[in-house]
Image (cartoon, rainbow, N blue to C red):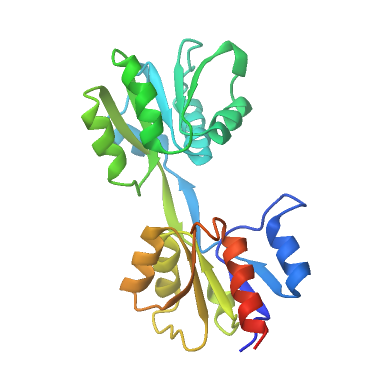
Amino acid sequence: MKVKTILVSQPAPKAENSPYIELSEKQKVKIDFVPFIHVEGVSAKEVRIQKIDLNNYSAIILTSRNAVDHFFRVAEEMRFSVPDSMKYFCQSEAVAYYLQKYVVYRKRKIYVGQRTFADLTKIIKKHKDEKFLLPSSDKLKDTIPSLLNELEITWERAILFKTVVSDLSNLEDVFYDILVFFSPSGIDSLFKNFPDFKQNNTCIAVFGNSTVAAATKAGLKCSIQAPTPETPSMTMALEKYIIATNKK
């Protein structure tokens, strides 16, 4: 079967030069974007139940833009004025850049990792005297607490937002040649919305080892995987598959 339609289980990209737009035009395929999961903030009351007092911390560990948004949202709801002396440890440059939405970048102490959380821990290790807060969702990679515990620092996790399954009932009678997933939560959402889902001739594309594992556990056959040395991005993996399939 030739590939004509693709559903990406994420919000549509905002950039006009998105590689998905280029892929769609180049390979003459229709690409739709529907987020299978979304984030909802936890109330200040729920944060207090976790016995989190923002006054107790001198440093914040930020792993995503969601963590940035919800930390400052909760701080505002709790009427906590974030002190200028607060230190920010950001997992990537993208997260650090996003922090500028809330603070004057050059006037704050901001430390940036290269890409992975393990990279960031090397920087955190140099600031052992700080009291760290890790704003996170209800779903957190097991490796993150393990790495922080290895550092023997004072830290606490605050669940400030939750990953929630989106309502996909409007897709019930819509079929795509390829479904693209980026997280185990996306796979969970598929089966929570459609418990009787049958893959049949639908191609499943997955990004990351944890997503591959979740898809396989759910009984799905993954025909497209990224990143690989040959196809480091999902759009590259999709294009390779489309070219090979549509030639037949």
Q: Nearer the viewer, residue 45 or 103?
A: 103
Residue at 22% x, 30% y is 150
Q: Where is residue 205? Give x, y as percent.
A: 51, 70
The x, y position of residue 46, in whole percent, is: 35, 39
Give the tally of numbered discs: 0
Residue nearest the observer in this picture, 220 or 197: 220
The residue that appears at 28% across and 26% down in the rendered structure is 155
The x, y position of residue 239, in whole percent, is 64, 69
Q: Is residue 214 above or below residue 19?
A: below
Vertical position of residue 103 compared to residue 9: above or below: above
Q: Residue at x 61, y 57 (%)?
A: 11
Horizontal arrangement in the rendering, residue 72 relative to residue 128 (left or right): right
Q: Quadrant of the C terminus?
A: bottom right
Depicted 77 relative to depicted 195: above or below:
above
Q: Is residue 56 visible?
A: no
Determine whether, in the image, residue 170 is placed left or right of residue 68.
Answer: right
- Which residue, as the protein is rendered here, is positioned at the far front? 230
- State the quadrant of the N terminus: bottom right
Residue 214 locus on image (x, y percent): 35, 66
Res 152 seen here: yes
